[in-house]
Amino acid sequence: MARLEVGKTAPAFTLLDQDAQKVALKDFRGERVVLYFYPADDTPGCTKEACQFNDELTAFTKLGVKVIGLSPDGAVAHVAFRKKYGLRSSLLSDPEKKVMSAYGAYGEKMMYGKKVIGVIRSTFIISPKGKVEATWYGVRADGHAVKVLAALRELD
């Protein structure tokens, strides 16, 4: 699995969001983006991570940062997930896992002591010019949003 390196250009993508609207990375040129990859809507770790990003959304917004979640789930699951937990960030669908693979967020990982192939919980800060500014692979969901916020404050 190829991991993205800080300073490299973030892989371009166009995916559908929860409202079946096309969202492309290029749409955010001039803005900083936090892109977080997670395995599945409405599972314990993914819910904790999404809710914590949601809890800190005002702080991200004050820094001029867009927060976007991305999983293999489709629009129907994303709509239900957002509604159930009051999530305000866009959630993108990558059912073929092509974008996840391009970011190194899909591949071999350890789960319950066994090697499996799946989504690797990962987060990226992407600069206003489309460059990778920070990466996290194998993220522990609890407390992660606060760590990303701290890293963003250090960038400025």
Image: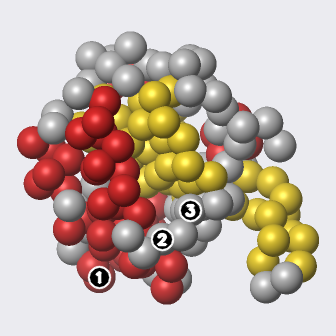
Tell me, for residue 36, which label it has, or none: none
Q: Which residue is painted at 29% across and 82% down in the image?
A: 84
Q: Residue furthest front?
A: 154
CA–CA distance in space, label 2 to label 3: 6 Å
**Which callout, 2 or 1, points to the residue nearer the camera?**
2
* Crowd class of label 2 (few under 14; some 14 to 19; many from 20; radius 10 Å): some
Amino acid on which the number 1 mark rests in the picture? Lys
Q: Which residue is painted at 80% across and 64% down in the image?
A: 109
Amino acid on which the number 2 mark rests in the picture? Ala
Tell me if label 2 and label 3 are in contact, CB under 8 Å: yes
* Crowd class of label 3 (few under 14; some 14 to 19; many from 20; radius 10 Å): some
SS type, badge 3: loop
Q: Which residue is painted at 27% across and 79% down in the image?
A: 85
SS type, badge 2: loop
Q: Which residue is mark 1?
A: 84
Q: Which residue is mark 2?
A: 141
Q: As displayed, is residue 4 above or below residue 29?
A: below
Amino acid on which the number 3 mark rests in the picture? Val
Q: Which residue is mark 3?
A: 139
Is residue 88 at least partly visible in the picture?
yes
- For the C terminus, the quadrant is top left
SS type, badge 1: helix
Q: As displayed, is residue 60 above or below residue 63?
A: below
Tell me if label 1 and label 3 are in contact, CB under 8 Å: no
Q: As displayed, is residue 123 above or below residue 152?
A: below
Closer-to-camera residue (105/78): 105
Q: As displayed, is residue 45 above or below residue 90?
A: below
Looking at marks 2 and 1 on the same chain, the residue that comes earlier in the sequence is marked by 1
CA–CA distance in space, label 2 to label 1: 19 Å
Q: Which residue is painted at 54% across and 19% down in the image?
A: 7
**Which callout, 1 or 3, points to the residue nearer the camera?**
3
Q: Residue 61: where, in percent of width, then height?
A: 15, 44
